[in-house]
Image (spheres, coloured by chain):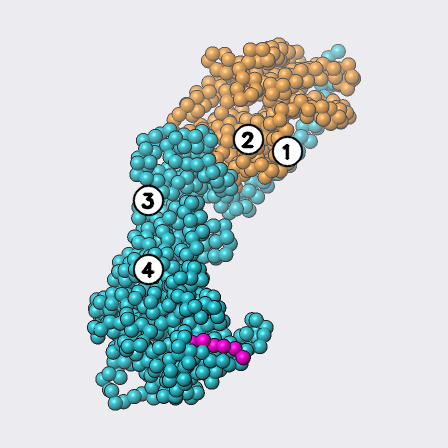
Chain colours: A cyan, B orange
Amino acid sequence: MLSPSSGNTVIKSKLIGRRMFLLTAAKAIVTFGIIGRLVSLQINERTKYKTLSDKNRFREWKLAPERGVIRDFFDKEIASNQQVYQVHLIPENSKDIEKLFVRLKTILNITEKKLFYLRRVIAKQKPWEPIIVSDNITWSEFSRLNLFLHELEGVKPIVSVARMYPDNSSAHILGYVSQVSAKDLQTKKYLKELHVPGMSIGKTGLERKLDEEIIGKIGFQRYEVNAYGKRIKQILINEGQAGKSFKTTLDFEVQKFTSELIKDKAAAVCVMDVYNGDIVSLVSSPTFQPNEFVHGLDKNYWNSLIKNEMKPLTNKAIAGLYPPGSTIKTLVALSALENGVIKPLDTFKCEGKIELYGEKFHCWEKDGHGIVNLRKGIQRSCDVYFYEVARKLGVDRLSETAKKFGLGKKVLDGFIEERAGVVPNTKWKKKFIGQNWYLGETLHSGIGQGYFQSTPLQLCLMTAQIANGGFEIKPRIIFDKKNNNLREYIKYKNENPNDPLPTDLLVSNFELKPLFKNQEHINLIKDAMFSSSNEPGGTSYRHRWENKKFTFAGKTGSSQIKRFTEAQREAEVKQESLPYKDRDHALFVAYAPYSDPKYAISVLVEHGGSGGKAAAPIAKKVIKKVLERHELRERIDSLLGEQV
Amino acid sequence: MFRARSIQSSLSIKDKIISIDYILVISIFILGLTSILAMYSTDGGEFKYHTKSHILRFFIFFGMFLTLSFIQIRFWHSQSYLIYILFFVLLLGVKYFGLTSSGSKRWLDLYFMNLQPSELMKVGLILFLAKYYHRTSIENLNRIRYLFLPIVVLIAPIILVATQPDLGTALLIAAGGLTVAWLAGVRVKFFAISGLAFLALLPIAISFLKPYQKSRILTFLNPERDPLGAGYQIIQSKIAIGSGGLFGKGFLQGSQSYLDYLPEKHTDFIFTLFSEEFGFFGSLFILFLYAIIVWRIIKIGNVTRSNFGKLFCYGFGTAFFIYVVVNMMMVLGLLPIVGSPLPILSYGGSSMMAIMLGLGIVMSCKVYKDTPVN
């Protein structure tokens, strides 16, 4: 019994040993498999997994930079920043968002609509990214929030800064800032790396033009966080960089003064330094409250802006298009002189109307101006005289001069709302209207009606370039110390009165671009404008300044909205008796002081009636204000010069 | 045979102590110390609950292992059925008096510790089958009649454990049992047949699976399926191991575990933690220790004379190896997360107890290698 049993045992042992050997081989294979996997993870792919591990560990929160400040010429902040109280919420830190909302509603003033919006935002972004529940709460709400903070997991009270405009007078030229929209993100490349939830960007005006530089550089905080999103320690902080601040050429005092002056009208005023193009004032009326846009616009306020027929959101000075009316007569005359079509003393007889090409053309003076030469034509703004001049000149030569003086194109840089206007000619009509030019239309163009369209800023530029002796200037609004060549030239000329420079030397020595062939022609126009404002019979004679210091030379204009019917003309219907919408736009351009031109101004009053009555009085007051501040401005200018 | 018996019975205490496999003991001890180091790291570098309790358990059960080594191999042989029945009764006890934690009923409250009988069953089944196949003659081995009992003792605890539910442990119990049966000489065709039967029953089995178990299997097949849900553990574990690189992030510097990205870092993912902090070389070190342990166990199986001893050592050694590789493959993303601890390294009293019990019996096979069991 023993031996078979033990034999059996031995066989069994051998069997077991054999099978164990197989198992051991299998084990070796599996072990090498595991080692292979370790090699692949820990050696071959270690960089990838290290990156992933760091991605786990670190989280970054972006910090919105402080927007740069915009100052006026005297370094007064016209777009500044103020402290605001905000409520932020980090969704992942809150156990129950809905409960939190209910609780927040009892503390803050949040609408259901806002909550709906917040839920959508939460669903879209990463759970640790903060959302802004409210970006501007009052101090009392803020302190109440802090009191209940222990019940509000995930909520963070934040003291931040936001845009603040001390005054509404410059709302149009400054523009406004508002929340970044989805469209902004698509269209503006610089926002791609910049965007922080809750950041405001410039939507119009200077705020928009300067946006890329004024926003600043984004900062970030990097934290080590655990798997539950709790911040363990701060690894890195980059404060970012506040946006660049800008100094403008605007004079805040003049802005306020002008704005107050025209606040009840739909109007615009531009004031420009005739030598360097510095825009001293650019006001459009009625204005709006840019501060309202910063923290999400109130719907009622928005509707009131949209529905207002005086169009408060439009910057009329650069985006409003008006026929230049009689203000263009300065250029018509200049163009005719330059092209040798007329001589200054050539006369025409005005009988109140002329008939040409089978059509009647009326002068605004029903009884006529009698014998009219160039000076009188401009002084009285005689339409018949200019019909004759325009007829001789032709629209193409007129358009050439008008374009040279800045009409028909955008004159500022980077303002999306600015419009170019129209300087019509035969080619233009063929291209855009598809018809041939009628000679009658030349006559309308000669008095600035018809297809002519211009902005008040263009008219101001036109006047400035006449006032400075006919040299090209570029309007500018961002302060720039350089580019005062024209001043140097004037200085040179005053020191060497008997040494007029030939044109080519003007260009090479002073980098000036003369817009004339003969400067005498410019002087003739300037003189005629003087007579228009300061001699009896002139269209703005009633609103002159006798004080030499303020004496200005100007040109009135009114742009027709509706043609007068024969019946109205016969009945001598006054503008004031027409319905508001049918009244002419009143225009006035001028430069001052006459003896030593420093500033040019253009005034537009929508549906104001005649330029002499509605626009000139405004110009008169603004001119005084600007000239009173001139010395102050000079002083600052020279101080700045010394610093360099 | 008489001679052998007389030799064995004449073993002095000194002889017994000398005959212990010191390489195995030292390897286990080093592994134990390593596990304390790892546990200290999971506690964030402080002596907190897990570390303290792990140290206590390791030394208690290490002592138990050494003590058990001197128990006669004959005792283990004669009592194996009883031990199996005892563990089975404990498993039944879990079903009726067990503690429920996170949805499964696995533990018995013994006041001084929570016992997980399924861990003990891993050893119990191997012990039972080692004895059974030791006693079954080679002619009867593959007779259907003789297959009946092994199938019953295999299936019964597996069903109990799987319904706790604890799929991972159930599979590991099965792996140990099947290994012994196969080593004993059961024909491959039976395994093939039961394998086919298993496949046929798989759809039914799947219908019994809890949703989380199904999701784990699906997730294993594609971990990125739900990166923040079920796949999270696999992804985070791979990130931790991979980011350890060659030399690791340094002791107590494992950001993945320190910042709680790593789940279950005390138990199933302890290897991940160690790999993250000590890198590729640390991983190799652990693998090396386990290889030595398995190698020594098999070696003891080679020198022990009885087939009972051989079957147990081979069976337990292989099962031990399976526990290790299943856990490692799991944390390396090569197997689904089934919840199986790493022997000795992982936190957990019952697992430690079962492993030390098994090692004790193995060591007893060494000390009494020439003693016949019947």
Q: Position of residue A590 (x, y in %)?
A: 32, 72
Q: Mark 3 is on which residue type?
A: Val
In this rendered view, identify the residue nearer to me: A15 or A316.
Answer: A316
Residue at horizontal 52%, vertical 77%? A359
Magenta-colored span = A358-363
In this rendering, which labeled residue sits more in front, label 4 or label 1? 4
Residue shown at the point (48%, 40%) measured from the top left:
A117
Secondary structure beneath label 4: loop
Which label number is shown at residue B84? none
- Write down the chain letter for disc 4: A
Chain of the residue where label 1 is placed in the rendered structure = B
Residue displayed at 34% across by 78% down: A379
Vertical placement of residue A88 versus A68, above or below: above
Amino acid at dot 2: Tyr
Q: In the rendered image, which quarter is residue B355 located in?
A: top right
Q: Which residue is mark 2?
A: B290
Residue type marked 1: Leu
The image shows residue B197 at horizontal and vertical percentages of 75, 24
Q: CA distance from mark 4 to mark 3?
A: 32 Å
Q: Residue at x 40, y 65 (%)?
A: A575
